[in-house]
Amino acid sequence: MSKPFDSNGKKPAAAAKPNRLGNVAEWADERVGLAGLAKKNLRKVFPDHWSFMLGEIAMWSFVVLLLTGVFLSLWFKPSMEEVTYQGSYAQLRGLEMSAAYASTLDISFDVRAGLLMRQIHHWAAMLFIAAMIIHLMRVFLTGAYRKPREINWLIGGVLLLLGILEGFAGYSLPDDLLSGTGMRIADGLVKATPVVGTYMSFFMFGGEFPGHVIIPRLYIAHVLLIPGLILGLIGAHMLLLVFHKHTQWPGPGRTNENVVGYPMLPVYAAKAGGFFFIVFGVTTLMGALLSINPVWKYGPYTPAEVTAGSQPDWYMGIAEGLLRIMPGWEPTIFGHPLSLNVMLPGQVGPFIIFGSILAYPFIESWITGDKREHHLLQRPRNAPTRTAFLVALMTAYGLLWAAGGNDILATQFHLNLNWITYFMRVAVFVLPVVAFFITRRWCISLQRHDNEKVLHGYETGIIMRSADGAYSERHEALGSDEAYTLTARDRDEVYVPADGEDANGISSKQARSDRRRGKLSKKMFGNNVQKPTAQELEEAHHHGHDDATLIGHDAGQH
Amino acid sequence: MRFFNSLAGRLSQVRRSRLAAPALLMASLLMTGGIVAVITPASATKYSADADAIAKGRALFLVGCSSCHGKNAEGIQTQGGGQYGPSLVGVGAAAVHFQMETGRMPMANPGVQAPRKTVIYNQDEIDSIAAFIASVGPGPAEPTEAEWSVAGATNEQIVRGGELFRTNCTACHNFAGSGGALPGGKLAPALTGVAEKHIYEAMLTGPQQMPVFSDGVMTPQDKRDVIAYLKSTESAPGYGGTSMGALGPVAEGVFVWIVGLGALVGFAVWIAAHTARTKKGSNA
């Protein structure tokens, strides 16, 4: 534990000699009143933990995206007008292509640092969404979405969705063979909408695919509309973060009412500010060393061409995977085909996965009926059902992701493409369930282990032999700090619904809902291991004093 | 007319003769043989001259190839009616040169497709087997260097080759020629590091899963352009840095999670662990 910051000086404060900087600051303060705001916020305390910096990776990669994106927009021509390429890349010289593709080639080969900027931009985009997802996982696993942070949870979800859309719009802009193939799939997804699909596609492309308007339209969405929304929502996300204050891990001195950490200035500003340069550095290194989206190799988009290894960027991978493993169901209804083979995997599947994780906090709070504010985080093991739910989703996500790259798996690991598909069709339903139960049991045994440690101390690894020859491992009591940390959590209460029947034995609607809630609550919390009671602790310690050195590790014998 | 009538009459008198059937057979054989000799391309007879090579090739074929392809290269059918080894009648010397010079044939074990492997036959042996296969039926001959060489290709031809490549080849072989998967464990192999001659022969003969791009479909010049494009991209520098296998966005996704995010989470752990006021070893 560090000492609280001591700001009380011994001598009374004296006004410093006015200096030039001070004069400027005062001039500004008198006109915009920044000092009051700064005074409060510069002392804002942030708790320190590596997992609290995952969202920062996303934020800083977004800043990198803005910087490199401005650079790219100076040269990119969002036009599908046919031009003849006359740039430096010999293998395509003299070909007819869209101005968008030609200008992307120019950025790559004829603009100084253009290729580097393009690659940084693309890597930062992939990183942006990856960082948002692991940030989401951290928030989910630690229960940081609980009251009062539900709105911020939803804002985060919308940010993720917007980020994915923004990424899709971005990698469609160069109008190379790969991005054109991606647009064709998007066109197919839109067309799979019953009744209005064709109309929607025609509105989108301004006529038959590919038309002449989609690139300029995507461009405006990519450089103005979506980034504007993302920027605004990041602002709201951060404001709410400041307003709610950051959550913290439980520990001695840390309560639901305080935040223990370091002030914004100078410590946290240096850490967070420094992290920006690290993120910029890592994306620049990747941009400089690793070739991403080599558009010149793909060639210009022609609807007649396609290439093996056509995949979307990773964040669209699950939609791709769903499409690839979906059986070809296309029933005909009243003489019209209903493209379930595209509609279910493309329009329904990803939103079920996305929606279920966004809705989970609300379902959980309905089941617990917990209306208190929570500023202390939960360890993933202490919410076994929640943790298991996320691991199940991660399993499904990972499998679909792999299914989206089934051809690469087939060639790289010498597997049969069809078998991968058949395996995935079953695995996406079975393995998440298996993962759920394994994770939940795993969490519960970790909870038991924590209780063991609290009650009987930790295993020292010292084996003792008693006078009559029995062996046992010596346990040593935990430090009080650690014991506090392990037990600084609420007991889970299984909700038991009241008997809601009226005089005639008829259940009210409310009672039926309560019974459902009770059932779910039992499923969700019934198996959890609760922290030891004070009495249990007392007994264990008392017991410990009797034979301090001879404690076997079987809890049953005590 | 009268002449024909009298001829028919005279012929009908001898139609029951003992010599009539053999004579008719002889006449029709001569006629068929004559027509075949006139319409068959010269390449079919190119190797037949070298009887020694054919005999040597046949001997090698009987040892190394006949267990699957049959003693006379007629192919062997499985009991289910499938092909154990396909008939090689008419595949030509070009197919033999491609399959054997890339080590695909003879196969080490049965499978859906023969993978590229170390060549164990020497050039003379391969030439002999090619001569034997060419002798059992007409087929494309081994292309000459003038046919496959792309030494003097112009940039215009390279660009044209790129167009042909993207239209006809990338769907299976990938945009960078890195190869791709086909159904049922089959695959389109990588084209990088493959000799010009073998790419030419592959297009000409359509080995394994590949369609035949005959000279009528894709002219020798088209084939050379495709090869010229492939060779020019192969020798081009890696403009953007390491290509990560040139496999497309899947490899990029792997790298962003493992390298990019891995490094940054590592940095986050490092930053959180080191604070101005944290003494090493303290529990803050």
Image (cartoon, coloured by chain):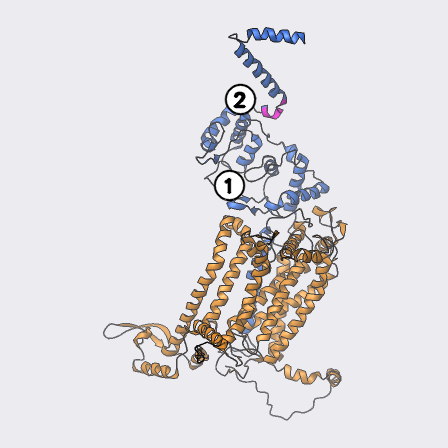
**Comparing labels 1 and 2, the label whose residue is closer to the camera:** 1
Q: Which segment did they paint magenta? A: B39-44
Q: State if disc 2 and disc 1 touch (CB < 8 Å).
A: no
Question: Hey, which quadrant is residue A482 in on the image?
Answer: bottom left
Colour orange maps to chain? A
Instruction: Kindly state the secondary structure of the residue where label 1 is placed.
Output: loop
Circle 2 residue: B51
Secondary structure beneath dot 2 equals helix
Instruction: Check disc 2 and give the amino acid type.
Output: Ala
Q: Which chain is blue?
A: B
Same chain for mark 1 and mark 2? The answer is yes
User: Residue A521 sits in which quadrant?
Assistant: bottom left
Marks 1 and 2, how far apart at CA: 32 Å
Residue B265 falls in image quadrant: bottom right
Give the image location of residue A89, x and y in percent: 71, 49
Q: In percent of the image, x 46 and y 62: which residue is there?
A: A433
Q: Report whether residue A412 is seen.
A: yes
* Percent x, y of residue A422: 49, 52
